[in-house]
């Protein structure tokens, strides 16, 4: 009995640590092409993983659109660029993945892509 409880707590702790993750990636190479306004652009994509309880109640990680935009824009240093433009957001709610378990503990994934104009210094330092 104690073994089952310990295993269950271990799995719950592992899930909690892995469930609230954020990943950022930035595209800086455009082969000399520029954005619509004739200026170079960088594209940052941020992906957030979390979990909801009973499908809709936030439990682990904050996967709301407000938090997503706040964290993603904080990853873009003011010294590196400005003139931000959100070009895509995505929300995945995995309530149907493995019912009835995922009806209680629902995996969530949100993603936001932000285009921004780099400063001259940041554009010069970017790989070509």
Image (tube, rainbow, N blue to C red):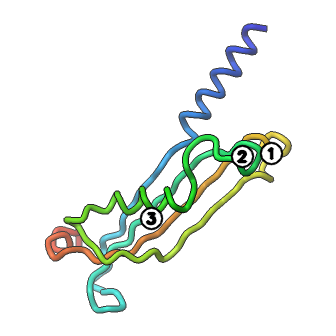
Q: Give yes or no for contact between labels 1 and 2 (Cβ–Cβ under 8 Å).
A: yes
User: Up-down: is 119 above or below 32?
Assistant: above
Residue placed under numbered mark 3 in the picture: 45
Q: Residues within 10 Å of mark 1 (few under 14, many from 20)?
A: some
Q: Nearer the viewer, mark 1 or mark 3?
A: 1
* Residue 46 in the image, given as x and y percentages of width and height: 46, 60
Q: Mark 2 = which residue?
A: 106
Cα–Cα gap, marks 3 and 2: 23 Å
Q: Quadrant of residue 39?
A: bottom left
Tell me which residue sits at (63%, 22%) in the image.
Answer: 10
Residues tagged 3 and 2 counted as in contact (Cβ below 8 A): no
What SS does tag 3 mark?
strand
Question: Looking at the rendered structure, which numbered label has been put on residue 70?
Answer: none
The correct choice, above or below, for 59 with respect to 25 in the image is above
**Which quadrant, please, contains the N terminus?**
top right
Residue in the foreground of this view, choosing between 65 and 43: 65
- Mark 3 or mark 2, whichever is nearer to me: 2
Q: Earlier in the sequence, mark 1 or mark 3?
A: 3
């Amino acid at each position: 009995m104690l073994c089952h409880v310990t295993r269950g707590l271990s799995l719950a702790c592992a899930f909690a640590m892995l469930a609230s993750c954020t990943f950022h990636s930035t595209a800086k190479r455009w082969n000399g092409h520029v954005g619509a306004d004739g200026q170079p652009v960088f594209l940052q994509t941020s992906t957030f993983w979390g979990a909801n309880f009973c499908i809709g109640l936030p439990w682990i990680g904050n996967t709301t659109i407000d938090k997503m935009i706040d964290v993603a824009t904080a990853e873009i240093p003011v010294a590196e660029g400005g003139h931000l433009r959100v070009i895509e957001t995505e929300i995945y709610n995995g309530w149907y993945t493995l019912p009835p378990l995922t009806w209680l503990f629902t995996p969530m994934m949100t993603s936001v892509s932000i285009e921004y104009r780099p400063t001259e210094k940041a554009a010069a330092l970017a790989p070509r």
